[in-house]
Image (tube, rainbow, N blue to C red):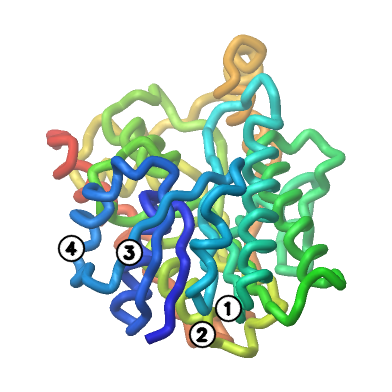
């Protein structure tokens, strides 16, 4: 049985990846920064599949300890761990340092251990910003010389560093695929609702937004993302590729809110927040500043033909993704319709 190291095991995407890998016949080693969360991870996995082929180890993106031991008996690395926050930090290195250093730490340990392949969770954030292309492809890169925000910059710089390593003489024979989701939605496996996706949905469902800002983003179901990560492990055609794995259409955030409203969450707003108001609020709020950057980017679509072709992938429809995430969060938090 081949073994996959999946970093950041308690994360929203990582939990789905662990389930998908176990169901696909791999044994899995999941890493945690805090081992107190092992019970929570196992409980989440057991909802979907048997956890007897899952082991847990302790790793930190900013600490060398444990990485060589963790990778030594693994065949593949699936690196999902990376910090994500919805506000602009005072110091961008709060996000850039762990994203970039953690990625390099993981790759160097995997290379030393003779791991065959790395599948790295990047983001559409590393592709679609700092320029004004209406249709983005996996050949595009975010221009970090522009004011794109700390999270977007962290994902771009971490991925660039990863590709530089893969192409360097330091790399033995390890290959890599990078997966580029848009905004990830879909049902949660654990009761941890602190992630950016869950936090955004909760705030829409409970009426924390008086109106919806004019943000457009591409969207993908977390179950699709997990499937694509695991299939990429052995898909030779994906070696050395960046794969854009999101909706082909950029959706107005209001469309997501309307789906929730139609599902009975009547506090979900259906009106649009004037951009002028955002501009007035942005100087006083790091969160509004982050929102304004996305508003300024405007609508863009994505060419996802490569991922469709390589994996015969037909994305889960938006309505299904949003409705099932809404139901999942309502159950966890007892949100009344």
Query: Pointers 1 and 2 in contact (CB under 8 A)?
Result: yes
Query: Which residue is the site of mark 1?
Result: 307
Residue 254 visible in image: no
Query: Which residue is the site of mark 4?
Result: 46
Q: CA distance from mark 3 to mark 1?
A: 30 Å
Q: Measuring from the top left, give residue 247's x and y in whole percent.
A: 52, 64
Task: Determine the secondary structure under disc 2.
Answer: helix
10 Å neighbourhood of mark 3: few (<14), some, or many (≥20)? some
Task: Determine the secondary structure under disc 1.
Answer: helix
| N-term-proximal mark, 3 vs 1 | 3
**Residue 115 or 93: which is nearer the viewer?**
115
Q: Measuring from the top left, give residue 126's x and y in whole percent.
A: 70, 53
Query: Which residue is the site of mark 3?
Result: 55
Quadrant for residue 13, please give it: bottom left
**Residue 2 or 319: which is nearer the viewer?**
2
Q: CA distance from mark 4 to mark 2?
A: 27 Å
Q: Nearer the viewer, mark 3 or mark 1?
A: 3
């Amino acid at each position: 049985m081949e073994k996959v190291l999946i970093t950041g095991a308690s994360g929203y995407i990582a939990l789905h990846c662990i389930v998908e890998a176990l169901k696909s016949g791999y044994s899995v080693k999941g890493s945690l920064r805090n081992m107190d969360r092992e019970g929570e991870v196992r409980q989440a996995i057991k909802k979907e599949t048997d956890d007897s082929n899952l082991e847990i180890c302790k790793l930190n993106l900013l600490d060398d300890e444990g990485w060589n031991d963790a990778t030594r008996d693994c065949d593949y690395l699936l690196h999902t761990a990376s910090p994500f926050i919805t506000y602009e930090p005072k110091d961008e290195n709060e996000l850039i340092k762990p994203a970039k250093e953690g990625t390099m730490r993981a790759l160097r340990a995997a290379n030393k251990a003779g791991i065959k392949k790395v599948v790295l969770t990047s983001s559409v954030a590393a592709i679609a910003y700092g320029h004004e292309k209406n249709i983005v492809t996996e050949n595009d890169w975010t221009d970090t010389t522009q004011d794109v925000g700390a999270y977007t910059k962290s994902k771009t710089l971490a991925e660039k560093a990863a590709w530089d390593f893969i192409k360097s003489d330091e790399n033995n024979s390890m290959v890599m695929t990078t997966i580029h989701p848009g905004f990830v939605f879909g049902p949660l496996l654990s009761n941890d609702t602190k992630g950016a996706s869950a936090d955004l949905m909760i705030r829409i469902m409970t009426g924390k937004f008086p109106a919806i800002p004019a943000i457009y983003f591409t969207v993908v179901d977390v179950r699709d993302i997990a499937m694509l990560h695991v299939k990429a492990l052995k898909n030779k055609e994906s070696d050395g590729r960046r794969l854009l794995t999101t909706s082909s259409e950029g959706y107005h955030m209001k469309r997501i809110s309307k789906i929730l409203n139609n599902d009975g969450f009547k506090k979900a707003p259906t009106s649009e927040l004037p951009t002028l108001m955002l501009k007035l609020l942005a100087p006083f709020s790091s969160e509004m500043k982050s929102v304004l950057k996305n508003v300024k980017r405007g609508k863009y679509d994505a060419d996802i033909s490569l991922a469709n072709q390589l994996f015969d992938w037909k994305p889960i429809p938006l309505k299904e993704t949003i409705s099932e995430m809404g139901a999942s969060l309502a159950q966890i938090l007892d949100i009344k319709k």
